[in-house]
Amino acid sequence: MKKLLILGAGFSYDLGMPLAVELTEIFLCIFKRIPPKGLVNNLLNSNKFNTERPVNEIALNKAIKIINDYDGKNYEELLSRIQFLSETNVKTSTSDRDSYFAVYNTCYSIIHIILVNYQIASFKTMYLKNRDHFNGLKNLLSKSETWVFTLNHDIYLECLSLDLGIPITYGDSEKITFPKSNIEMDNIIEMTFSYRNEFLEHNSFFKKDFGINLVKLHGGLSELHYDDGKKICNQSLKGNNSIELMYEFMNIQQMGYYFNGIKEPSGKDRVITDLKGNLDIICQAMMTGGKKYSITNNDKKGEEKLKLFSEMLKQTDEVTVLGYGFGDKHINNRLSNAMLLNENLKIQIVDKVSSGIPLSLEQFDYSGRVRTATCGAAEWMEYVGTSRWNTDQIEGLKNNENLRNKIREKVKTLFPSC
C-alpha cells in the first residue's frame, strides 16, 4: 500500500512548536510596542538611497495601522491583509506596493525570528522529553518509500527520523558550502540542494526503498533559496542524531557578514559570506501569509513542490493528515481533485480538535473514504501499531501544557518589549 502523509501545525504540538494563536500573541506584543513613527522613519531611511523605487510615508502608515488595529488570533490572516493592500485598487502605485512590501518584510522577519527561537527553546524543553512518544512513526510509513508533505517550518520530522533510524531525504543531489561568516571562515557549513528546474525529476528521492521523501510545501526554517532562487538549499541530514542536527541548525541561523566588526542586518534576503569572504545574499524560504501559492490549479513556475504534491496523490492509496486544520485552499483543492481522479484514495484525518470532515471533502464521505480521529499525532501512531489506545502515553502528553507555557515565556524574554 502506498502511503502519503500531510503534516500540519498539530504534528509538532507535543514537541513544543507554537499554534497560530500563540505565535500571533507574541508577534503583536513585539510589533505593537514599536512606535509607529519610529518604524516609518527606519523604513524610510533604509530605502532613502533607492531613488528608482522609493517607499512613501502615507502607504507605510496605512499598512502599519492595519497591524495596530488587528485584534484577531491568526498572524497569517493579518499578513494577508497587508499583502492584499496592493490588489485593492488597480491604480495602486509602485511606491505604495513597495511600501506595503517593506512592512510585510518587517513582519516576516519578526515571525521568522520567533519561530527560530521556538525551535531552539522547545528542543531541550519538550522534544528530548517527548520523542519516545513518537516511536510509532514507522507505523504510518509504507514498506517502500513514503512521501511526506509538511506545511510546518520546523525540523522535528528530520529530528525524529534521525533518532529513530528512519532514512530521510529532501531529494537533493548536490552539495554547497558556506563559511559561517567572514570572521569565521574556517567554520564551514555544508548544505545540500536541488536545482529548481530539475526538482520535478525527483531522481534523488527514494524509489522502492524504505524511507521518507520529505517535501516542505511551505518552505522551512532550515531551507534557503540561493542564486536568484535557482537552487533550493536544505540543511544537511548527514548528522547521527537530533542533537547534531540542532547544532547545525543554529550554525545556519547565525550565518552572516561583518563590516567593521558589526554584523550586517538582514531580512527575508539574508546577508551571508561566500567562500572568498565576500558579501553574498541567500533568501529565507519560509512561506507565510495569504499568497503562498496561486489560486488556480494549473502548473506554474515556482510551484514545483505543489505540482509534485498533485502527482504523488494520484499514485497514493492512503493519505494521513496529521494536525492540519484545512485552512489552505491550494492544499484542499488538490486533495479534492485527487479524490475524484483516484477512486482508490482514502484519507485519514487526525487532529486533537474535532471539527468533522472539512467542506472540501464532504462529497467523498462514503464507503470509508474519509475517516477522522480526535487525538494527537503521537497517540495515533501508537494506535495504528497496536490497535489500542495507550493510556500511559495519553496521560504523559497531558503534562505538556506547563512545558509549553515555559517555552512561550522563554521566547518572550528574548524580546524586551514583551
Image: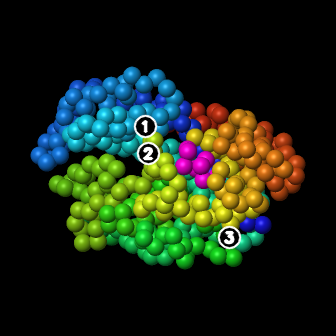
The residue at 83%/57% (across/down) is 385
Q: Quadrant of the N terminus?
A: bottom right
Q: Front-most of 307 and 242?
A: 307
Where residue 145 is drawn, which disc sits there? 3
The residue at 71%/35% (across/down) is 355
Q: Please state which of the two labelled residues, at mark 2 or mark 3, is closer to the viewer.
A: 2
Give the Cα separation between the discs numbered 1 and 3.
36 Å
Where residue 12 is drawn, which disc sits there? none
Residue 262 placement (x, y as % from top left): 22, 51
Residue 340 placement (x, y as % from top left): 69, 55
Q: For residue 71: magenta?
A: no
Give the Cα separation between the discs numbered 2 and 3.
31 Å
Q: Does dot 2 land on a helix, a strand or a loop?
A: loop
Mark nearer the N terminus (2 vs 3): 3
The residue at 13%/48% (across/down) is 52
Q: Quadrant of the C terminus?
A: top left
Q: Is residue 352 above or below residue 367?
A: above
Q: Amino acid at mark 3?
A: Glu
What residue does disc 2 label?
291
What residue does disc 1 label?
80
The residue at 42%/55% (across/down) is 285
Q: Does dot 1 land on a helix, a strand or a loop?
A: helix
Residue 26 placement (x, y as % from top left): 46, 32
Give the Cα separation between the discs numbered 2 and 1.
7 Å
